[in-house]
Amino acid sequence: MGNTIDYYNENAKKFIDGTVSVDFRSIQDTFLELLPGNAKILDFGCGSGRDTKYFLDRGCRVDAMDGSLELCKSASEYTGITVKHMLFQELDEKEMYDGIWACASVLHVKRVELPDIIRIMSSATKANGIIYLSFKYGDFEGERNGRYFTDMTEASMAELLVDFPELRVEKQWITGDVRAGRGDERWLNMILRK
């Protein structure tokens, strides 16, 4: 994760400019529709804070965290809440959240470390809570433009989830990239129910 976090610290402004105003409502609303009103949400790798702000504006109680100190500073300013500077592995909550939102975040974790991260997310989710995950679609794993990526397909996700009988796939779908000039990139979106 070291290089990836360095990338986000060094390119925070550019990253925020490219993501903060992207219209992501259809996926945000798909997530919110599965949650109770006034839901407690964790934005797990919040980046610019775009999604945290969207959820706060809709009456949710949101905790947000990111591994990049620079993104934490900017996201705190943007959202009006204190974004925690911490790594995925440092989350230690038990059954606290109605929903965990991991949008294009845990895709930076090495494939061999993903089971530990999913276990951490599952522990932090309340019974009947949900976890949203998104990955670039494919089989690639390694460094791409200064960041580490683990891409996933339906098959590789199914294989990963075998060890998590408490989690079932509620919804799984593929989307194009919503950012300008990224139309041919595909994403695997998934909502897990505990």
Image: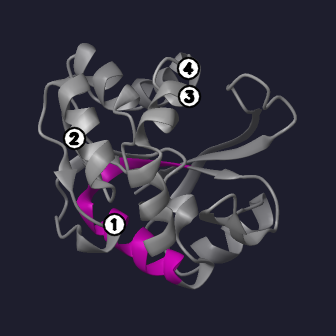
Considering only order in the chain, which callout, 2 or 3, is on the residue closer to the N terminus? 3
Query: Which three-letter amino acid code belongs to the residue tagged 1?
Result: Phe
Spatial separation of the CA atoms under disc 4 and disc 3: 8 Å
The quarter of the picture where the C terminus appears is bottom left
Considering only order in the chain, which callout, 2 or 1, is on the residue closer to the N terminus? 2
The residue lying toward the viewer, choosing from 123 and 134, is 134
Q: Where's residue 114, x and y in %?
A: 52, 75
Left/right of residue 173 with respect to residue 30 in the rendered view: right
The region drawn magenta spans 113-133
Which of the two marks, 3 or 1, is nearer to us in this view?
3
Q: Where's residue 106, x and y in %?
A: 50, 60
Considering only order in the chain, which callout, 1 or 3, is on the residue closer to the N terminus? 3
Residue 18 circle label: 3
The answer to whether residue 40 is visible is no
Query: Which three-letter amino acid code belongs to the residue tagged 4?
Result: Val
The residue lying toward the viewer, choosing from 91 and 98, is 91
Instruction: Say if mark 4 contacts mark 3, CB within 8 Å.
Output: yes
The residue carrying mark 4 is 22
Which of the two marks, 4 or 1, is nearer to us in this view?
4
- Most extreme residue toward the bottom is 112
Spatial separation of the CA atoms under disc 4 and disc 1: 24 Å
Q: Is residue 79 above or below residue 154?
A: above
Spatial separation of the CA atoms under disc 1 and disc 2: 17 Å
